[in-house]
Image (cartoon, coloured by chain):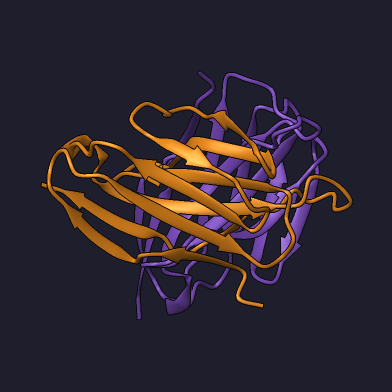
Chain colours: A purple, B orange
């Protein structure tokens, strides 16, 4: 089946540092999504990307849809303690009847105050 | 709006027992999904439904059954629980069209342990 390779698996950073994580696939997708999961909660959508090359920001978060349509990255600037959680890259092919999501394995972010 | 709710939050079963997990959404969404999340893994799709009375298999359907008798509810059943089904289960829902975002809204999860 289709797989997403997300890295790094985990990060331990100091408050105020910038964070970068990425996701690659051998398959082409027309949609990339980034979700965050707080401890004990379900995932919540952070950013959605629909065009190759698209760069989108949401506050301190910036994500890009790779030109090849096989990758995406997420950057978090000036991290704060509430950024702690698991970040998932998620892909899909928009327009399918099911809208089924394919999840990466996640990047677990820990922030030291 | 409560969004997506799941019942129960926690459950411990013995091997061979059966149970039903309930998902409810009050957003009038057509599509609903059941996922499982295992340590170090992303979410994997078990079953989904594109409307009342319809269901379909996802990536890991074996050992599970589902029903969508009402639009707002999606039930996940385990007929004979196995230790391999120890996991956190998430329900999600979304609209099929109208919004370009295809955002799935997730419930808080049900933590199931099978002994």
Q: Which residue is situated farthest in the bottom direction here?
A: A113
Tell me if B50 is positioned left or right of B41 in this view: right
- Residue B60 x/y as whole percent: 42, 28
Q: Is residue A101 visible?
A: no
Q: Which residue is situated farthest in the front direction here?
A: B69
- Residue A53 x/y as whole percent: 80, 38
Q: Is residue B9 visible?
A: yes
- Using the image as rendered, state which of residue B96 and residue B37 is in the foreground: B96
Q: Is residue A74 above or below residue A82?
A: above
- Using the image as rendered, state which of residue A42 and residue A62 is in the foreground: A42
Q: Residue at x 42, y 40 (%)?
A: A105
Labels in figure, total: 0
Q: Is residue A81 above or below residue B73?
A: below
- Residue A7 x/y as whole percent: 44, 41
Q: Residue at x 34, y 66 (%)?
A: B9
Q: Residue at x 43, y 35 (%)?
A: B65
Q: Residue at x 73, y 25 (%)?
A: A68
The quadrant where residue A41 appears: bottom left
The quadrant where residue B64 appears: top left
- Residue A99 x/y as whole percent: 70, 37
Q: Quadrant of the C terminus of chain A?
A: bottom left
């Amino acid at each position: 089946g289709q797989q997403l390779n997300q890295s790094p698996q985990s990060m331990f950073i100091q408050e105020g540092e910038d964070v970068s994580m990425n996701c690659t696939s051998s398959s082409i997708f027309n949609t990339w999504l980034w979700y965050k999961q707080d401890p004990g909660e379900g995932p919540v959508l952070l950013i959605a990307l629909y065009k190759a090359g698209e760069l989108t920001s949401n506050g301190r978060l910036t994500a890009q849809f790779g030109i090849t349509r096989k990758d995406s990255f997420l950057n978090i600037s000036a991290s704060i303690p509430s950024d702690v959680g698991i970040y998932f890259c998620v892909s899909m092919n928009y327009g399918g009847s099911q809208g089924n999501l394919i999840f990466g394995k996640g990047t677990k972010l820990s922030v030291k105050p | 709006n409560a969004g997506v709710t799941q019942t129960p939050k926690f459950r411990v079963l013995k091997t061979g027992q059966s149970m039903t997990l309930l998902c409810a959404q009050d957003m009038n969404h057509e599509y609903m999904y059941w996922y499982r999340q295992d340590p170090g893994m992303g979410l994997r799709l078990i079953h989904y439904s594109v409307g009342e009375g319809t269901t379909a298999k996802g990536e890991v359907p074996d050992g599970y059954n589902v029903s969508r008798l009402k639009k707002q509810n999606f039930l996940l059943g385990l007929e004979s629980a196995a230790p391999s089904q120890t996991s956190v289960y998430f329900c999600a829902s979304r609209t099929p069209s109208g919004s370009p975002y295809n955002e799935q809204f997730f419930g808080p999860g049900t933590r199931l342990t099978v002994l």
